[in-house]
Image (tube, helix red, strand yellow):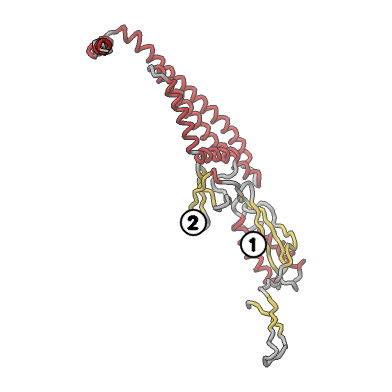
Amino acid sequence: MRVVLYSVFSQESPSPEPTVDVTESVSESVSNIVDVNWWLDSVLPAAIRIVLIIVILLIVRQASNRAIRRAFNRRAEKAQQVQAADGQEAIAAKRKAQRAHTLSSLFQNIVTILVLTTMVLMVLAQLGFNLGPLIAGAGIAGVAIGFGAQSLVADFLSGIFILMEDQYGVGDVVDVGDATGTVEEVQLRTTQLRAVDGSLWFVRNGEIMRVGNMSQDWSRGILDIGIAYAADIPKAKQAMSEVGQAFMTDPDFLGQVLETPQVWGVQELAADSVVIRMVVTTKPGAQFAVERALRERIKVKFDEEGIEIPFQQRTIWIRQDPGSEMGQSGTNLAQGDG
């Protein structure tokens, strides 16, 4: 037992690992700096390669952006040529031109990001960095961010499809479910809507399940006008048609109405009135002002023609208890708000 313990404790401890001589490293670096051959053989080729990478990728970026601009500008020019005409074709052409400019800017930004990312990676490779762990770490980080920010990714993808499919644009009046208003800005993540009361709504693109665009290409105003049951329906329809024809020459709304307003006929036999429907096709967003103006002119025309616009009427039956003074007699009263 003593021999064993002696042999164990008598073994020599392992020698420490050799350390790097800092002085030698510093002196070697200094000698390399002052050595012209080191600059010519090591630094100059790497610098030339880095400069070539930067120049080539910048040229690729410039050429790609120019090609994108030409392609979308060609579409915008074709659309602008149609704008000289009047009517729905000019409106659709204007929207196509706006959409072409928006998509051109989007694709140019995507190309710029891809080129700059490639440039940074290639320059780091020339400087001697090992890109394997860097790319692997970036991939893991991307997966983690993707799982943690799924709603953010969904917002960006939805924003891209909204722009590409031209679901709506700046100036459109849209209904996105929780908010209704005029589109003030369309971004890749959010859409800004201005409501009638002035509220500015920020709606995430990923949460938009459906869109009702009230001002794309053309709009339609719908007027349901009620007349009394005793009124002459053909006379009322004729009066409304005359108002619509005169409205086409109104200088205040010249160019806002695309077609002569049409009287479709009796829409409903309501409790208090016979409802006659009139429709008018307008430029996008102009239907609300046109509807208000037409209602005012129809009211004036009906007053001139003696056509009654009725108020609410109800028939009320009053019953008394058998022991009351009036007995079981009832009274039929017609009551109105006038």
* x and y percentages locating residue 274 in the rendered image: 73, 68
Q: Which of 158 and 70 is in front in this view?
A: 158
Residue 28 shows up from this direction: no
- Label 1 crowd (10 A; few <14 / some 14-19 / many >=20): many
In the rendered picture of this protein, how many numbered marks are placed on residues? 2
User: Which of the 4 image quarters holds residue 166?
Assistant: top right
Q: Nearer the viewer, residue 2 or 115?
A: 2
Residue at image point 68% right, 75% down = 313
Q: Which mark is residue 313?
A: none
Q: Which mark is residue 198?
A: 2
The residue that label 1 is drawn on is 294
Labelled pair 1, 2 in contact (Cβ < 8 Å): no
Quarter holding the C terminus is bottom right
Placement of 119 over or under 29, stated as above or below:
below
Quarter holding the N terminus is top left
User: Which of the 4 image quarters holds residue 70?
Assistant: top right
- Label 2 crowd (10 A; few <14 / some 14-19 / many >=20): few
Helix, strand or loop at disc 1? helix
Q: Is residue 15 left or right of residue 98?
A: left
Residue at image point 74% right, 72% down = 229
Q: Which amino acid does label 2 sit on?
A: Gly
User: Which of the 4 image quarters holds residue 71?
Assistant: top right
* x and y percentages locating residue 140 in the rendered image: 46, 29
Helix, strand or loop at disc 2? loop
Q: What residue type is labelled 1?
A: Leu
